Amino acid sequence: MDMSSIMELLHQKLGNKIGDFLLPPPVFDFMGGELLEFDKQSACLKIRFPILDGYLNPYGVMQGGLVAAAADNTLGPLSMLVAPPNVTRNLNMKYSRPVTPDLKFIIVEAKLKARDGRWLTFTAEIRDQVGHLLARAQALHWIIDLGEEQA
């Protein structure tokens, strides 16, 4: 599924409210996000992000906050695709390996793990192109509009 297909799904889901949202968000474009896969059945979204020189910290590796931003730039769109409007309440990161520029890009795979009333739990794994785990994220989202049809 490509970005235009994702946009079409969002248009169907959000209807005339789409004008209230910046889709895709400017930060997604700024970070060079590229949609790889979306599986509505398993509530899973996979996006690739390049590792740019401007993302490097003094140690020459991708700054942890930008790794977290890549996770958030995958978790957020997934949350819009699988649930009513919601916001991130917290995002926890666990880093396993440095993200070095020789990797060229990272792949973030986000999944909806649970829904309990207005609370959504998401997880994400950040990997390199050969599948080495670089970091994990867990996010708790809160549904802000229960008037929407439940996804």
Image (spheres, rainbow, N blue to C red):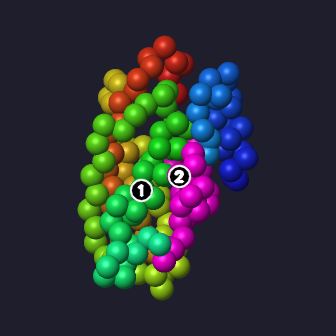
Left or right of residue 4: residue 134? left
Q: Amino acid at mark 1?
A: Ala
Question: How would you rate the neighbour count of disc 2 (Cα within 10 Å): few for under 14, some for 14-19, many for 20 or more?
Answer: few
* Distance from Cα at disc 2 to Cα at disc 1: 9 Å
Residue sitting at x 43%, y 31%: 86
Task: Locate residue 115: give its quadrant.
Answer: top left
* Magenta part of the chain: 25-53
Residue 40 included in the magenta stretch of the image:
yes
Judge whether 108 appears above or below 53 on screen: above
Residue sitting at x 68%, y 50%: 3
Judge whether 123 appears above or below 148 on screen: below
Task: Locate residue 114: give its quadrant.
Answer: top left
Q: Which residue is mark 2?
A: 27
Q: Nearer the viewer, mark 2 or mark 1?
A: 2
Disc 1 element: helix
> Percent x, y for residue 92?
27, 52
Left or right of residue 4: residue 27? left
Residue 103 included in the magenta stretch of the image:
no
Judge whether 57 appears above or below 47 on screen: below
> Percent x, y for residue 13?
63, 28
> Percent x, y for residue 4?
73, 47
How many marks do you count on the picture?
A: 2
Q: Which residue is mark 1?
A: 69
**Tag 2 and tag 1, C-beta contact below 8 Å:** yes
Left or right of residue 27: residue 124? left
Judge whether 12 appears above or below 35 on screen: above
Residue sitting at x 70%, y 53%: 2
> Percent x, y for residue 125?
39, 61
